[in-house]
Image (spheres, rainbow, N blue to C red):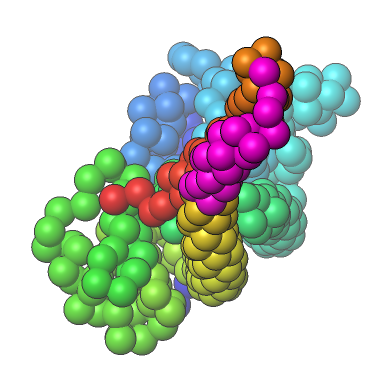
Amino acid sequence: MPEKQKILIVDDDECNRFLFERALRNDYDIRSVASGESCLEMINEFTPDAFLLDVLMPGGMDGFELCQEIRNQNSFNNSLIIFLSGLDQPEKKVHGFKVGGDDFISKEFGVNLLKAKIDSQLKRVKASTEAMSMAMMAMTNAGEIGQVALFFERLNEAESYEALAEQVIDICKIFDVNAAIQIRLGNSSINLSTTGTVNRLENEFMFAARNANRIHTLGKRCLFNFEGATLLIRLMPEDTDKSGRYRDHLASVMNGVEARMRSLNAELVMKSHNEGLVLNALKGTHTALDGMMLEFKQHDLLSKDIIEKLIGEMHLAFSSLNLDEAQEEHLMEVVNKSMNTMTDLSSAGMKLDQRFENVTASLEKLLSPVH
């Protein structure tokens, strides 16, 4: 059964209070007091949806003054205030509206008209309040959806599983929920929390619950289980509507996490494959360089052997050519210069090979996995 709306009657005439209470008590939760001072004391505990104020109350504040005091309290900005008076002066009614009143009813019209007016006005206030509440909820929901949309926009910026977990923790902080996430990677896992630490019991709990329902509620806790990842909300909001919205938003977030984990896995596999191709190419380069070095050494040895044999044969030939000493020295100088040139060429080739070695070693160091 819906809760009755509350009405507080303020009138110094006990008879009037009795009549009004009797006419309204079946439909409303009624309280009545005899003065403005008593009204202000009561509204700290009893929060009326409507006030019925007598205008003239001798010995204390009148209805207009009381209306101003009530309107000065933000909690009663939307409460209905109706003045009850036998006065019919237009200037009094204008003053009543200026100080915050909603309507004027003459006591002479009787309780039936009063009840009809109150019913009509409270329905209007209730409809207005509900509309405002729905508008505020829609604005709140739009803001939350905006944060989820921003999360998806930045999702591909996560280039590692650690960065992805951090993005989830960031949006949980924006939603002001105490949370922990576990991303499972084979025999290891990444565990992060909005509080900075995830205790061992929570780690084990998330791992053990990985095969539970996709969204699993345990009292005030809520688990979001997706492929390779589990989000634990340690304390869901008390408000039912807010809790429902957060379930939807965080389920969307974890759907995005699952998709990004799949693409990250594909990217890392491709990267590993490409690195393997490069390393294989480097190994081939090493093999080729080793062959080049061996050939250089063989060519160098062969060249030296040929030159040494040539020098020996020339010495034998000198004796039969009847060359003088100066001619022999000139021919030997020509041969030695040629031999030195060949040696220099061989050395240059060896230096070039060493440079290739240095380059490939540097590439291997860059591509080697960090342990």
Q: Is residue 302 magenta?
A: yes
* Above or below, 25 relative to 262: above
Rendered image quadrant of residue 199: bottom left
Point out the stretch of residues depicted in magenta.
300-324
* Above or below, 154 relative to 68: below
- Give the residue at x 69% y 54%: 153
Where is residue 96 drawn, in percent x and y? 74, 25
Q: Nearer the viewer, residue 155 or 83?
A: 155
Where is residue 275 drawn, in percent x and y? 54, 62
Locate residue 310 relative to residue 301 in the image: left or right. right
- From the image, give the main secondary structure of the stretch colored magenta: helix
Q: Nearer the viewer, residue 136 or 362?
A: 362
- Give the residue at x 30% y 86%: 211
Where is residue 93 drawn, in percent x and y? 80, 27
- Give the residue at x 85% y 20%: 91
- Give the residue at x 29% y 50%: 371
Locate residue 181 relative to residue 61 in the image: left or right. left
Q: Residue furthest right?
A: 90
Query: Can residue 361 be seen?
Result: yes
